[in-house]
Amino acid sequence: MTHAEIQDLLEAYVDETLDRSARAEVDRHLRDCAECRAILDGVPAVQLHMAESGQFDERAMRKAVRTTLFRLAADVVMIGVVGFMVLVLLGWLVFQPYIVNRGGRAAAATQATQDLAVMYNPGAALTDSLHNSGIITRTSEATVAYPVGTELVELGTVRTRIGPLSFRAAEGGPLFPYLGGTSGTGAAQQLAEQLAQVGGGTVATVELQFDPPLSMARAQELADSPLDVRVVWAGFATSDNEPTGIGLEPDEIVGYGTCDYRDPNADLLAASSGGSSGSAFTQTPSVQRALDATRAAVANLLSHRELIDSLNPGVTVGSVTAAGDYLGGDPGVTTLVVTGPTPEVQRFIEEAAPAAAGVRGIEFSNWYQPLCGR
């Protein structure tokens, strides 16, 4: 073969696609040809006297350079893909289970994100939740709402992020509170009179407070009232302080929805991403269920105390500890949130005889769908 023919075979020689006889001939040529050996190294020899004599093959040189650059680019891309896959596998197999979730803290943070938006906000309930595990962090979302009649009024979505060292609000703000102060506060009799003036054709959601607290039995009796109303949230005292009226401080009362559905067997780390959605008001109202959910929320926070101060400036480890102590027996029900047609809510207030009451919301009638299983 000629020198030019050998150069045309160099790429196939590198790719090892030549037959045995052709490869042997190229080998013999390479022993004596420095220019071809240089081309194989990706740096074609450039000698002016060869170019002048017509022996310099510019086309072969460009082809060799192009081949080398393509291979280099492919190697860089492959290294990047392999590196990313290694990081993802390290995240799933090492960072998430052994660092981010050491001691169950990631699952506890996801549960706390849901609980803290509900347990300190009378009337609130979880409607949507989501968690997503990244390489070295885990983010959680909880959307909360409260009912005015059978319409769920969304309060917003809280987002938290837990990493190897910290747990904080993903948006940089405190988790508490969603429900601020209430309007129309005053004595229960005055509120009943106000609702009477509103008249029929509307629905209302009201917060009732009791001093002294109701027993669990009495609170459940009210929740089972034949009146066409629903008790959707129950709150419990965390200290011996007397109720101060609507708008208690965050550390004075804790509670939960009476008809929230919570799956006790749910594995919050079963997948890298997951969640649930739908109406939170699905079961028959149960004050005991609210107490059990509150106890579970407090126990979760106390098992990972670093989650408390990180999100709620008004909620301290001491206040949560006190709540756990008072929830041990029959803590007494200090707060009920009730919704339904305005005339029915008015009669409920007269029957319950609360010490204080306030309006969460009044809207036109939307009492046409089942709420809390009724």
Image (cartoon, grey):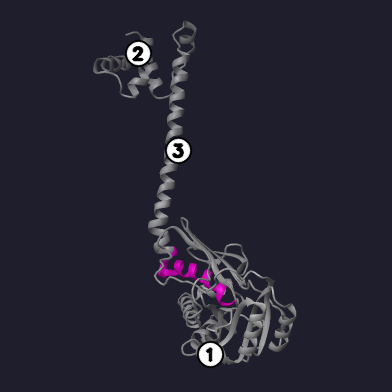
Dot 1 falls on a residue whose secondary structure is: helix
Location of mark 1 (residue):
218
- The earlier-in-sequence mark between 1 and 3 is 3
Q: Main secondary structure of the magenta part?
A: helix
Q: Residue furthest top?
A: 53
Q: State the mark number for residue 77.
A: 3
- The N terminus sits in image quarter: top left
From this view, report whether residue 331 is shown above or below residue 18.
Answer: below
Q: Residue furthest left?
A: 20
The residue shown at (42%, 35%) is 75
Looking at the image, residue 70 sits to the left or right of residue 12; the answer is: right
Q: Provide residue 90's location: percent of width, then percent of height.
A: 40, 54
The residue shown at (63%, 73%) is 177
Gap in angstroms between the C-alphas marked 3 and 2:
32 Å
Q: Provide residue 283's location: percent of width, then percent of height.
A: 49, 74
Location of mark 2 (residue):
6
Q: Residue furthest right?
A: 197
Q: What range of the chain is rendered magenta?
A: 100-120
